[in-house]
Image: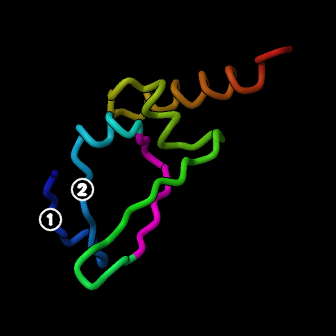
Amino acid sequence: MHTAFISKWGNSQGIRIPSEIMKEKKLRIGDQISFRTSDPDSIVIEISRSPKKLKAAGILQKYAKGKPDLEAEQKAIEEAIIEKYTKGH
């Protein structure tokens, strides 16, 4: 079992998902999760995979390779657009 804490995140609250769970469940930035309560002391989290669309977070994660600068991000977006629109042409 993994433990997480509810934290303040801007004007909202957030729960950080441990990297082991992200890897095990093959979660990506942008994936949607749903919560439901099954009893007063439990919360069930269900995974809804994000559609395979061109999303900024996914583009930067895939192509910028962790380099947090504008030039790397711009290049990542250009590479993603080229890949998306030149496949099969």
Q: Are marks 1 and 2 in contact (CB under 8 Å)?
A: yes
Magenta stretch: give its range.
Answer: 27-36
- Amino acid identity at mark 2: Arg
Q: CA distance from mark 1 to mark 2?
A: 7 Å
Which mark identifies residue 5? Answer: 1
What x and y, as percent, mark residue 22? 32, 41
Residue 37 appears left or right of 5: right
Q: How many marks?
A: 2
| Quarter assignment of residue 36 | bottom left
Say which amino acid is labelled 1. Answer: Phe
Q: Is residue 31 above or below residue 89?
A: below
Mark 1 surroundings within 10 Å by alpha-carbon count, few (fewer than 14), some (14 through 19), many (20 or more):
few
Other residues around mark 2 within 10 Å, as few (<14) / some (14–19) / many (≥20): few
Question: Is 65 in front, or is 72?
Answer: 65
Q: Residue at x 20, y 72 (%)?
A: 8
The residue tagged 2 is 16
Farthest residue, direction top = 89
Tell me which residue sits at (16%, 51%) in the image.
1
